[in-house]
Image (tube, rainbow, N blue to C red):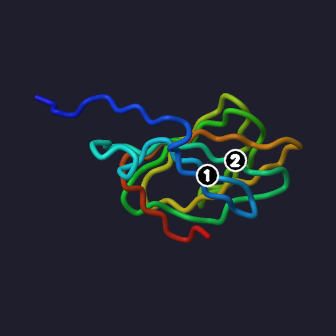
Amino acid sequence: MNTAVPTLVPQEKAGVIEFDWGQLTWFVTDQLVPDADMTFGRCIIRPGQENPRHYHPNCSEILFVYQGTIEHTTAEGMKKMTAGDSISIPKNFVHQARNIGTEDAILMISFSSAHRETCGEN
């Protein structure tokens, strides 16, 4: 039987990290929800900007484009993604997103671990 209980994370408790290229906001992590087994957040990439090439050695990622247009680049090539598109990224897979639109690109991101590890991120 599962002993975990639902945990509300109020908006003001979310962890916000600013970068030159945009912003990451974490809504669910192991730090915010001790019993969590996933990470959930939002990535904002400003027009003409890109996040650094990176990979996650301990978890897979699902990226959903909520707003805007991005080019998502992996070793498999580049994929143009627009609002409503999603991509599943396996662990250890190097990737990067670039906003090719004129508005902020808003991406909802989920990871298969509550303690997401990232290599290559600045």
Q: Earlier in the sequence, mark 1 or mark 2?
A: 1
In x, y percent, where is residue 70? 75, 45
The answer to whether the residues at label 1 and label 2 have Cβ atoms under 8 Å apart is yes
Going 85% across and 41% down the picture, which residue do you hit?
103
Give left or right: position of 61 versus 47: left
Side of 6 where 12 appears, left or right? right
**Residue 74 found in image quarter:** bottom right
- Spot occupied by residue 91 in the image (x, y as percentages of width and height): 42, 56
Disc sitting over residue 83 in the figure? none
Q: Residue at x 85, y 55 (%)?
A: 48
Q: Taking 63 as reference, is 49 above or below it?
A: below
> In the rendered image, which quarter is residue 52 located in?
bottom right
Q: Nearer the viewer, residue 46 or 9?
A: 9
Q: Residue furthest left?
A: 1
Q: Quadrant of the C terminus?
A: bottom right
| Residue that sits furthest to the right in the current view | 102
Mark 1 sits on what residue? 24
Q: Quadrant of residue 80?
A: top right
User: Height in image: 8 above or below 35?
Assistant: above
User: Where's the N terminus, which quadrant?
Assistant: top left
Mark 1, residues whose alpha carbon is within 10 Å: few (<14), some, or many (≥20)?
A: some
19 or 97: which is nearer to us?
Answer: 19
Residue in view at x 35 percent, y 33 percent? 7
Give the side of residue 26 with respect to residue 97, left or right: left
Q: Residue at x 42, y 56 (%)?
A: 116
Report which residue position mark 2 lands on. 44
The amino acid type found where label 2 is placed reads: Ile
- Residue 84: percent from the left, percent from the top? 66, 28
Q: CA distance from mark 1 to mark 2?
A: 6 Å
**Helix, strand or loop under label 1:** strand
* Secondary structure beneath label 2: strand
